[in-house]
Image (cartoon, rainbow, N blue to C red):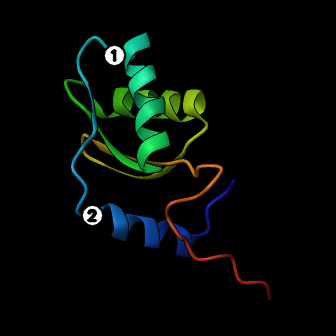
Amino acid sequence: MILTTQQIRHLRGLAHHLKPVLMIGEKGISDNVLVELDRALNDHELIKVNIAGAMKKERQVVTKQLCQVSDAQLVQMIGRMSILYRPNKKPKLIIPTAHKK
């Protein structure tokens, strides 16, 4: 699923008030982190991930790996915070549909 600009803006607005549900420390991505990531995306669809103790390039790599492993979409990355979205089979969040021209 590729998100449109309108959908990304909508999801960023929804994520604004969210607290991080997953924190990744200096040890990086472990099996336990991946299990929690999958559980959080199943429960919430839209989550914030705090990636601590890494330089910007490293945070970008970690975020990309999280998206690939979980089949999630990156909504936004600001500083140490990444916002990920993965719709459920029965979506809980309603996002705008793409307009056809």
Q: Amino acid at mark 2?
A: His
Q: Secondary structure at mark 2?
A: loop
Q: Nearer the viewer, residue 6 or 45?
A: 45
Q: Is residue 30 visible?
A: no
Residue 41 percent across, percent down from the top left = 46, 41
Q: Please state if 36 lies on the left or on the right of 64 as rendered.
A: left
Q: Nearer the viewer, residue 86 or 51?
A: 86
Name the quadrant containing residue 57: top left
Question: Which residue was labeled with disc 1?
Answer: 28
Q: Is residue 49 above or below residue 29?
A: below
Question: First in sequence: mark 1 or mark 2?
Answer: 2
Residue farthest along the right direction in this orientation: 101
Q: Residue at x 21, y 49 (%)?
A: 19
Q: Is residue 27 visible?
A: yes
Q: Amino acid at mark 1?
A: Gly
Per the rendering, the mark at residue 16 is 2
- Label 2: how many Cα within 10 Å (few below 14, some 14–19, many 20+): few
Q: Please state if 2 lies on the left or on the right of 29 as rendered.
A: right
Q: Is residue 80 above or below residue 12?
A: above
Residue 52 percent across, percent down from the top left = 21, 28
Residue 17 percent across, percent down from the top left = 22, 62
